[in-house]
Image (tube, grey):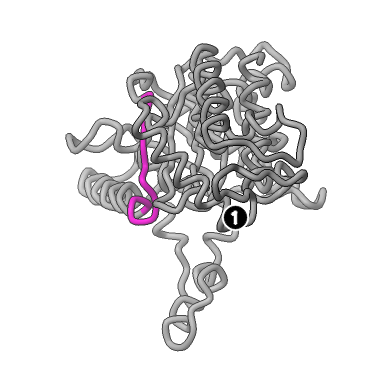
Amino acid sequence: MDDELKSDSAVLIQNAFCGLIAWLFYLAPRLAYEVQVRGQEHISGQHPVLIVSNHKRDLDSLILVALSYLHGGFEGHSHPIAFALREDASWRGFLQAYLRLPGLAGRILGATSLRGHLHMLRAFPIGYLTDRRQLERIRGQLQTFANLIDRGYDVYWTPEGGLSLDGRLARFRAGLYRLVENSSAPLKLRPMAVFYDFMTTGRTRCFVRIGPESWIDRSVGRAEFEQEARLAILRQTTINVAHLAVAALREIELPASISREDFERRLLHHAGRYRSAGLALDPRLESAASFRRRLDAFLDYAQSESLLGTVSSVDVPSDVLERGGMSYARNELLEAEAAFGL
């Protein structure tokens, strides 16, 4: 049932349920990650707003939707926000297919449907278009979100439609533009971005940045609109030590062996260059002591993963930028540099 048609008591229950789940979503990822949030001053209070973000890991949406819902803090519930969720999440047995628990717990989850709970959370399905016969169903799903915008709801959307597998912000699916095209209410775009500093022997740090909101111009074509949205997301990149290492190593003829002091000097040079260009840095890179601690953890990780050899010097293999996390960080850095014209 539409929120506008519910009784006051039903709305109160729904808001309490949404608030509870939002706080659980807000707190649970902090058990796995050290979450840092920047840019909350950019939240204008204008409604409706279309919140767009990149998508790195499964927990991204939990973190970002909860932040969007709870940006006002404990005082009351947020303005209604709807978000797109993979279509099969509302199917019976989804949790068991995702978690694969054994025994009784698995059988219970196999018989469980989250459909009602997801609707209370204003999480609505969106499918992948893999066959023309699905076109009308997906058009209907997109129209649901367009109608929500016209009723004043904020909408959270990940334009890639799936996880980034190589660090790049993937090609946007058509749904983002169709959503804007099918709605008519004055609408702002709020870009968000999440990045993980996972190349460490310590706890992974998750950086969330909220960018300035801007009015959406429905007169522009799809290509121009998507490019503007893409740049708005990429400009919220947070540079971490792995990005600095990529910038330093690609300047060197590989394989090579360089002193720890020279490696650190090169990283500091690029940190200053990116800061001057307007890119955000991991705060740990801003002071000498925390910079060296973070660099130590990065080098320990790189040695344990056979990315770099570090004893008295930093030994760099010829293909280091093609390996695992370094390749992922390289792709992130290349896109951030392009977004800032570097």
The residue sitting at 39% across, 55% down in the picture is 32
Residue 147, visible in the rendered structure: no
Asked if residue 90 lies left or right of residue 178, the reply is left
Nearer to us in this view, 112 or 200: 200
Residue 315, visible in the rendered structure: yes
Q: Which residue, as the protein is rendered here, is positioned at the far bottom?
A: 103
Location of residue 240 with respect to 17 vertically, above or below: above
The residue sitting at 25% across, 31% down in the picture is 72
Location of residue 5 with respect to 152 vertically, above or below: below
Location of residue 204 with respect to 77 vertically, above or below: below
The C terminus sits in image quarter: top right
Nearer to us in this view, 151 or 59: 59
Specify whether residue 234 is painted magenta: no
The residue sitting at 52% across, 46% down in the picture is 299
Q: Which residue, as the protein is rendered here, is positioned at the far right?
A: 132
Please report the bounds of the magenta region as a residue range.
Answer: 29-39
The quadrant in which residue 248 appears is top right
Q: Which residue is mark 1?
A: 87
Q: Residues within 10 Å of mark 1 (few under 14, many from 20)?
A: some
Asked if residue 291 lies left or right of residue 165, the reply is left
Nearer to us in this view, 64 or 329: 329
Q: What percent of the width, then of the height, locates residue 227?
A: 68, 21
Q: Secondary structure at mark 1?
A: helix
The quadrant in which residue 181 appears is top right
Specify whether residue 33 is painted magenta: yes
Q: Which residue, as the protein is rendered here, is positioned at the far front?
A: 312
The residue sitting at 75% across, 41% down in the picture is 255
Asked if residue 217 lies left or right of residue 281, the reply is right
Asked if residue 48 lies left or right of residue 169, the reply is left
Residue type at tag 1: Glu
